[in-house]
Amino acid sequence: MFYSRQRGSALVVSLFIITVMGAFAAAMIRIDWSAQDTTTREVFSTRAWYAAHSGNEIVLSKLFPLGQTTSAPQACDQTYDFNQQVELFSCQTLQVSCKTHSYKENGQPANKYQLESTATCGSGQFTTTRTQEVWAKDLNNNE
């Protein structure tokens, strides 16, 4: 008597479990995809940041060569393109612009240099651009 009233309940329970497990699997796939997307963007952002930093360092080494007591202002007031070298970071572009700002310090002429480096890494929806700005100035020989 009780057996006849319970017919088909296993089918309903199994369909419910399959539906819940399917929804759970879909949610896990979405979370995994989101984590991969975030990681990819983070990697390209870090590469772009370090590429921009490296561009500023290269131009600073041209502005302040080793073994010299003064800066080399002729290395500034231009834009540098390091598009070939930036492939080491798996990036597309790296540009560094340099501007000279002249001023007087303690009656002596001096220069301030404004460097702005922009790097672009990634492709498609993962394209990431980072910009860094650096200021440097001449030191007095008295310091």
Image: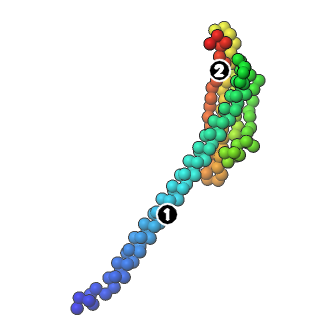
Seen from the viewer's position, the closer of residues 99 and 73 is 73
* For residue 42, side relative to residue 138 (left or right): left
Quadrant for the N terminus, please.
Answer: bottom left
Secondary structure state at the residue bearing disc 1? helix
Q: Position of residue 118 (x, y in %)?
A: 66, 38
Q: Position of residue 13 (x, y in %)?
A: 35, 78
- Residue at 72%, 20% in the rendered image: 68
- Residue at 46%, 63% in the rendered image: 28
The vertical placement of 24 against 112, above or below, is below
The vertical placement of 139 against 40, above or below, is above
Q: Position of residue 89 (x, y in %)?
A: 66, 45
Can you see residue 121? Answer: yes
The residue that label 1 is drawn on is: 29
Q: Position of residue 129 (x, y in %)?
A: 63, 43
Going from N to C along the chain, the mark reached first, 2 or 1, is: 1
The residue that label 2 is drawn on is: 137
Q: Which residue type carries mark 2? A: Lys
Quadrant for the C terminus, please.
Answer: top right
